[in-house]
Amino acid sequence: MKIIVTGATGHIGSYLIRDLGLQFK
């Protein structure tokens, strides 16, 4: 869970990280 990274990247980055996280999990 990279909440800090998500907040730094922004909404678009959050979506990408979220998709990657879902696939990784």
Image (cartoon, rainbow, N blue to C red):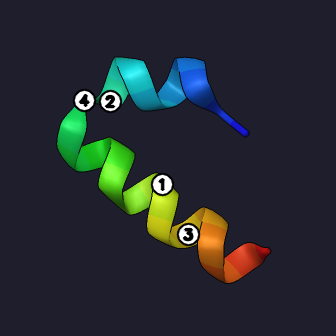
Q: Dot 3 corresponds to which residue?
A: 20
Helix, strand or loop at mark 4: loop
* Mark with earlier residue (2, 3): 2
Q: Determine the residue positioned at 58% across, 26% down.
A: 3
Q: Dot 2 corresponds to which residue?
A: 9
Query: How far is mark 2 from mark 1, CA to CA?
Result: 9 Å
* Mark with earlier residue (2, 1): 2
Q: Please state the horizontal and vertical placement of residue 8, each as a whole percent of the image.
A: 37, 18
Q: Residues within 10 Å of mark 4 (few under 14, many from 20)?
A: few
Q: Please state the horizontal and vertical placement of residue 13, each as a whole percent of the image.
A: 31, 45
Q: How crowded is mark 2: few (under 14 residues within 10 Å), some or many (20 or more)?
A: some
The vertical placement of 14 against 16, above or below, is above
The vertical placement of 23 against 14, above or below, is below
Q: Determine the residue positioned at 37% across, 60% down.
A: 16
| Residue ranking furthest to the bottom | 23
The reply to whether dot 2 and dot 3 touch (C-beta < 8 Å) is no
Helix, strand or loop at mark 3: helix
Q: Quadrant of residue 22?
A: bottom right
Q: Dot 1 corresponds to which residue?
A: 17
Q: Dot 4 corresponds to which residue?
A: 10
The type of residue carrying mark 3 is Leu
The type of residue carrying mark 4 is Gly
The reply to whether dot 4 and dot 2 touch (C-beta < 8 Å) is yes
Q: Please state the horizontal and vertical placement of residue 2, each as a whole percent of the image.
A: 65, 33
* Mark with earlier residue (4, 3): 4
The reply to whether dot 2 and dot 1 touch (C-beta < 8 Å) is yes
The type of residue carrying mark 1 is Ile
The type of residue carrying mark 2 is Thr
* Mark with earlier residue (1, 4): 4
The reply to whether dot 1 and dot 3 touch (C-beta < 8 Å) is yes
Q: Quadrant of residue 25?
A: bottom right
